[in-house]
Image (cartoon, rainbow, N blue to C red):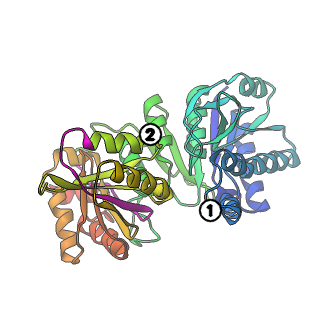
Amino acid sequence: MDLLVQKFGGSSLATPQKVLSAARRAIGEFEAGRSVVVVVSAQGDYTDRLITMARQIHPEPNPREMDTLMAVGEQMSIALMAIAIHSLGHGAVSLTGAQAGIRTDNVSSKARIRTIDTSRLRRELEREQIVIVAGFQGVDVDDNITTLGRGGSDTTAVALAAALGAERCDIYTDVEGVYTADPRLVPQARWIPVIDYDELLELASLGARVMHSRAVELAKRYGVPFRVRPSFSESEGTLVTDLSGEMEQVDVRGAALETEEAKVTIRHVPDRPGVAATIFSEIAAASINVDMIVQNVSEQNRADVSFTVMQRDLPRAVQVAGRLADELNAAGVDVNEEIAKVSIVGTGMRSHAGVAERMFRALADQKINILMISTSEIKVSCVIEAPAGERALRAVHNAFELEKNDTDTKDDNE
């Protein structure tokens, strides 16, 4: 029997009516002869409300207890979904991450899945149950509840699809699929019917909210094609798969804006071998992910080292940077939270010259100053002042004519 994994995000489960609608989708696939595993997120903004409640008690709550708290939302959702399926006359069983066999490392709020014991899942599927699994969570070696980070239910769904050998994985959300940019910020943004793993991975990591980047990483590693589909219609959405070698004619496929980063600068650090290694090994030891890094030209054997982190990691990053500044006899630490990052992405950029210059020109024409630059084979990112973020996104989207179909762009290029 074919196996399908479906994932429903919080907006798709925000009301009892939406829970019932999601339940009907799962039942429809079951009645079509498939085994069905459903992964759910917390309803609506429930996780944000839990975080707010905790921070009203303490501004920096204990990480272990925060994981225990934040896992509550998904456990509510699995029970409601199972109740909905029961009410519609079908069998279902709800499982927490632990009951579904999901084992993680012990990094609170950013745990990574290590193994999945699928024996319980397979037993329930053999009993012809629709299995409802709490996304975003697992347990570590000591059976502590862990969470996978924001958007972690996507990762749960893809990981289960890989572990179970699923035929399909459908990620249901509140948009038609993947767009060339956030349509709320760029009205001309175009729906993309098929996109490469690498392109979506970059878009997800650069600020696009449609998918969790770690979920895309897993899908690529294990060869799990999946669809990003709307929960409000029968549209097939966007297919995410391996398109390497097929995108040569398309230089840029999408643009993204990240507004939740901050820049940290350690001023006047000694400019000698090993200092950068010391700084970023300490940052990594604190489980802080660094995005861009810039070191300015040395003057009098001193240099400024700047790096960007997510704002949620900023308090810890500043604490570590301050300690390092003291240890290295640096001049101090500066923080800029008023930044944004605009990026362009496309696998075809590998074989197209002049892409970066075209982006820089688009920003210059809007009189937008670039603070930092990062490039790879398939993306260019620029850190700018936050107030210019949405204007910058629209400017680069227009510069690359992303509102056109890929075939239109190809014809223009020819």
The residue stretch that appears in magenta? 249-275
> In the structure shown, which secondary structural element does the residue marked by tag 2 occupy?
helix
Residue 207 at x, y percent in the picture: 42, 58
Above or below — where is 231 with respect to 106?
Answer: below
Where in the figure is residue 141, as x and y percent of width and height? 65, 27
Q: Is residue 266 magenta?
A: yes
The amino acid on which the numbered mark 2 sits, given as a three-letter code, is Ala
Using residue 69 as the reference point, say whether residue 307 is left or right of it. left
Q: Does label 1 or label 2 sit earlier along the sequence?
A: 1
212 lies above or below 344? above
**Label placed on residue 59:** 1
Is 412 placed left or right of 103 in the picture?
left
Above or below, 12 relative to 201: below
Quadrant, the N terminus: top right
Name the amino acid, label 1.
Pro
Residue ID at (27%, 67%): 396
Residue 240 on image: x %, y %: 45, 43
- Badge 1 marks a residue whose secondary structure is loop
At which x and y percent is residue 69? Answer: 72, 51
Label 2: few (<14), some or many (≥20) within 10 Å? few
> In the rendered image, is residue 256 in sight?
no
Residue 285 numbered mark, or none: 2
